[in-house]
Amino acid sequence: MMEKQMVMEWARMLMTYKFALDEVETKLTILNEELQFVQHYNPIEHIKTRIKTPESISEKLLRKGLEVTKENAVAYIRDIAGVRVTCSFSTDVYRVYEMVSRQSDVKVLELKDYIKNPKPNGYQSLHLIVEIPVFLSDRIEHVNVEIQIRTIAMDFWASLEHKIYYHFHEDMPAYLKEQLKETADMIAVLDQRMLGLNEQVKRLGSPLPSTH
């Protein structure tokens, strides 16, 4: 009976995170569609959401040396709910961040800019943890959601790096790490060149149209 109650408590907690994800996704979609209507340009190419499984949450708590409880999960795991936003250009990344952070019911708890300050392996992305109010039938829950915002090129590199890292785990050969870092640098240059092309097009009349 106690185990069944715990399962129900975890399921209810994860359901609340799903509601928070739904709210963030709706906010992003509205902002994107508004800009498409007003400016005939939308900065967001793709939105992808995910919620960590109970197994993944438990593993992360154990790695932190914490007891596997619902309370610890809420208190110490900030990326249970995650949203990945893919944009065309690096300027769009910051534009999306500014639009989201200006909303009155969004509280930015943490910001990590891996675009201006890439990780040693070359990883680039803008990470933020936001707090979203979720209005339930009997109370308001304030839920943390991680939002990762990156360009298409950054996302391509991150996806490939993740697959290679998952294959080798901690034993990735040094030459592969070096090649990945070199590729990340190339992608950063590519992003800047594509941004420059878009700026030239804007000066000639209008920004590049959305692919949607």
Image (cartoon, rainbow, N blue to C red):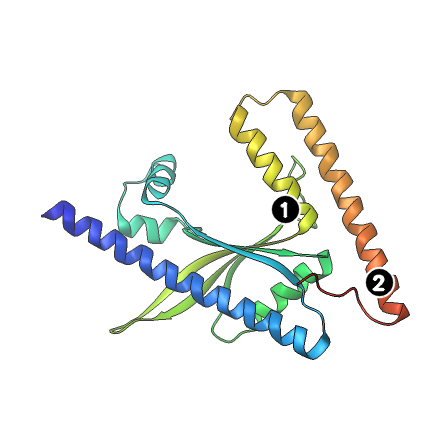
Task: Check disc 1 and report the residue beneath it.
Answer: 155
Residue 103 screen position, x and y as percent: 54, 74
Local SS, label 2: helix
User: Residue at image x 51%, y 76%?
Assistant: 104
Q: Residue furthest left?
A: 1
Identity, as a three-letter code, of the amino acid under mark 2? Glu
Task: Check disc 2 and report the residue beneath it.
Answer: 199
Residue 98 screen position, x and y as percent: 63, 67
The answer to whether the residues at label 2 and label 1 have Cβ atoms under 8 Å apart is: no
103 horizontally vs 184: left or right: left
126 horizontally vs 196: left or right: left
Say above or below: 158 vs 47. Answer: above
- The quarter of the displayed image where residue 209 is located: bottom right
User: Residue at image x 22%, y 54%?
Assistant: 9
Identity, as a three-letter code, of the amino acid under mark 1? Asp
Residue 27 screen position, x and y as percent: 52, 70
Residue 171 screen position, x and y as percent: 55, 21
Local SS, label 1: helix
Q: Residue furthest right?
A: 204
User: Residue at image x 63%, y 49%?
Assistant: 125
